[in-house]
Image (cartoon, coloured by chain):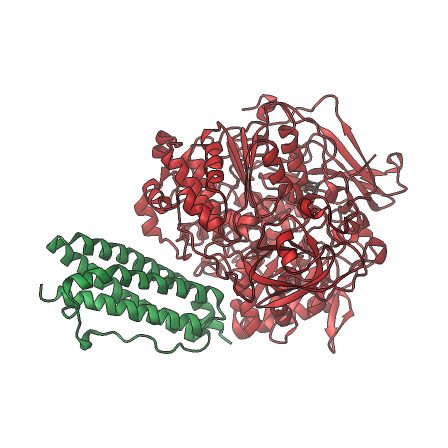
Amino acid sequence: MSDRIADIYGARTPHTKGTVWPARVDQFLDPGVDEGSVDSWVQSACLLCSNGCGVDIAVKDGRMVGVRGRATDVVNHGRLGPKGLYGSTRWANSGDRLTRPLVREGGRLVETDWETAMGRIVDRSKSILDAKGPLSHGFYTSGQLFLEEYYALAVIGKAGIGTPHMDGNTRLCTATSAAAFKESFGADGQPGSYTDIEHCDAVFLYGHNMPETQTVLWARILDRTRGDDPPRIVCVDPRRTLVAMEAERTGGVHLAPRVGTNLALMNGLTRELLVNGWVDQDWVAAHTLGLEDLRSTVEPYTPEHVGDICGVAADDVRRAARIFGESEAVLSTVLQGFYQSHQATAASVAVHNLHLLRGMLGRPGAGILQMNGQPTAQNNRECGADGDLPGFRNWDNPHHVQQLADAWDVDAMTIPHWAPPTHAMQIFSYAETGSIGLLWISATNPAVSMPESARIRRILEGDQCFVVVQDLFLTETAELADVVLPAAGWGEKTGCFTNVNRTVHLSEKAVDPPGEAKSDLDIFLMYADRMGFTNRSGEPLLGWRTAEEAFDAWAAITAGRPVDYTGLSYDRLRGPTGIPWPVNDEHPDGTDRLYAEAVFPTDTDYCETYGHDLITGGTVTEQEHRAMRPAGRAFLKGAPYTPPHEEPSADFPLRYTTGRTVYQFHTRTKTGRSGDLNRAAPDAWVEISPTDADARGIAEGDWVRVESPRGAIEVRARVGEVMEGAVFAPFHYGHWEPAAADGGGHDDANHRLANELTMTVWDPVSKQPAFKTAACQVTRLRASDGPAPAPTTGASAPAERDGARRRRPRPTQGGGPTTSTTLAETPTYPLDPACGAS
Amino acid sequence: MPHLTTYIGLADHSEQTLADSFRTVAEGHARAADVFHTCRLLASWSDEHRTALAPIIERYGEADVDEPERLHAAGLAESRDGDVGLLRDLQDLHVLATLVQTTWTVIAQGAQGLRDHELLNVATRSNAQTARQLTWLNTRMKAAAPQVLIVAP
Ligand code: SF4
């Protein structure tokens, strides 16, 4: 029986390089439920981060009562982390679910029936369409719906209404990952695989606090670093995370660049590869374009110059580059420290450049994992509910648009391809002026998660735009809506989703949704029916009625594209494991890693984009692209470092960065309703270095005010492991508070929202907002009666130096009992090179 | 070289006009965060072109490179209001940047004729960066146009 709040990763199952990762089945059941009394186990995958662990849902008396990892699944080999174990099902049974639609009457939201609620939406939608046309409609969705739901939404938006104003909160978490792939390789698509972990000599984690964002993936790495012939870890992060400690332990390097200077560091690493000859010349000549431009771009970035810009030791830059340059197989992973920071796309593309220069792609151990924040972000990108065209098609290529028009039997002119898709920040600007008059928000909480949240709330509550919200709960965003629709959640509906390394899982319905709640798919179909969207033959535009029919329609339109689902079906997905795309005649069992033949989807007629200027975001034209004759070669693209948009000043001398903790997900909609998780991180805090704390007379647990030019929060201080000059705040905490029994009841709920301080500024290519580069000041307000409510595990641990002084926070613990069973015989995993697949 | 110096003066002057105009648009449309930051960045590129040109102007003699008033292009003294104003401002910047670019093109020809490597280098590099300014202006106009033309509030 283990407490997985205290023991986040569970017991180690170390193994040697090149051998299969052992299987261990982790299980949690609600208190009072024993295994024998479970009525049924229903196949699914975890929806609480982008790792996508295979899971079975325990059902008893029509309720979800726990979860068990699937031993045969290629993703997790049976393991689950604390969020998956404690957070998967509790929310579903919490008493405050939305069970009936709500409409605004005299300023208040009141319960009503579906007929009335949908009637209001459709009336408003039709009248605005008549008056202002399709560009009056905007859709802002999630990274947590199912593939079938995104696809339905994409068809409604692009072929039913015809608006380019579609995006998701994936813009906040994963847009840079997609943008970076497109710039380097011509199309989205994760090159690497989790199986690279078993074969690599080094793992580079760029701005990726994997131990807190994808705990099971980190456990997989720990099982290598604690086994024989371990890889070295290189960590790029301004905080001393567990990754940083593992880097120290394995003889790797921890590089802690100043917030906002990632690209300078990457240019330095690139230059080191070039000047030391750590380049596979023949491979580069055969498979890439742009070497000489890249060489001249990075030339000024000597280790000393990089040291000055980034505040790191020049020799550490040399050591890290040497590890990259001399390893046989490097795995790189990238996340928010790069994506949500300054020059996001350029810095992420630079990771690709390092791999391309060494020809390290497409073989076991040599891989890239540009991560996603949310569990189904990948599907939003694939299906085009984020504004892209479905199937990684190029909106600038008339033939690609025509393919969709033919598949949907609509006029190609309907499909908005005459302008780039509108990104989230711009959608909210249009809603601000009323230029968008109907904004439909599904399964996300922008009032908490978007930058400059005070402005976002103003936009949502104003009269200039009619706001529809569909969600599980009355979130901070739903409270401001004109119509609120109750949605069914995970386990209450059927659908598929795809994790970071392209593995598709089917998630079956385990129980009925509460009250009148409906699946997001059924809600979208209901709207489409009531709007009367038809194709040119007069048939309903969305002809399908079930999730499976939607899936098959989706699979059909992926034929011939990189994201090929044509070989997948619900039947196939009911097997022992999820299956990574492409799955087609050529790869009937799926594909473990892309680009094994070093042929990239860059051909002008095939690619998803012609590319952009990484500094300005200006688009490359078709003619310019054709003139380069990429023909399957990858692009080496570079850019010089420019200072962040907001540098520290006398009034705001510290650098403010936001992030996450292992125990919470997103805006706590689900994790906040699991007492085990929420009590581990019940309230907001801010982390500050011992030096900066001393200079301000701040002790552990003191109430402090953190202020930027845009707003302020008042929370308690953790004197922690951030680098000097930096301040870290978790972004999960809005004004919603869970029940006291689950660790709720804090009086700072109205002044703790980390995004009050962040800036409305975004990367020129990916349009991902820069949550990690604002300037701030911290001042002490008063003492409190205990330490900060921050966990002591992970990167939020109190500073070691601070330990001897005053209060020592109690260790974070107290999760309910879970079981872990290591299997004596490890199953055979399809496509796994350690199981003999190649 | 009767008019090469005139054109060097034109390049210097029109880059300054372009830089000032980018800053005017940045300030005037600061609510559009990308316009604010990108226009300021692109203004700094024009500044850099002038800095690179400075030693050449000195070499040719400052008096000689004074270009006549009648060749001046007027910049944007003020920005226009609102979304349609932004679109129109971007068009004006595009016209100015086109003048700058063609100026560098003809200077590069002159520099080649004179085998003035330093000038050729400055003209070529500045020309390439001006092309990037134009590309961004085009991209941004295309992004803004549909909403402005069809549903501006
Ligand atoms: S690692 Fe992610 S997908 Fe796996 S159990 Fe944890 S939250 Fe769920």
Q: Position of residue A340 (x, y in %)?
A: 55, 53
* Above-or-below relation of B115 to A55: below
* In the rendered image, the vertical position of residue A243 relative to residue A411, given as above or below: above
The C terminus of chain A, quarter of image: top right
Q: Position of residue A782 (x, y in %)?
A: 74, 64
Q: Is residue A227 left or right of residue A403?
A: right
Count the numbered circles shown: 0
Towards the viewer: A350 or A161: A350
Which chain gets the green colouring?
Answer: B
Is residue A676 visible to the viewer in this orientation of the structure?
yes
Is residue A183 visible in the rendered image? The answer is: no
Q: From the viewer's perspective, tell me whether residue A330 is left or right of residue B102.
A: right
Q: Which quadrant of the figure has residue A129?
A: bottom right
Residue B105 placed where, x, y %? 21, 59
Query: Which image quadrant is residue A71 in?
Result: top right
Image point (45%, 72%), residue name = B29
Rendering quarter of residue A787? bottom right
Q: Quadrant of the N terminus of chain A?
A: top right
Quadrant of ligand 1: it is top right
Q: Residue at x 32, y 67 (%)?
A: B94
Residue plotted at (56% across, 27% down): A199
Between A368 and A203, the residue placed more toward the observer is A203
Front in this rendered view, residue B73 or A140:
B73
Residue B20 x %, y %:
34, 71
On screen, residue B62 above or below A497:
below
Rendered hue of chain A is red
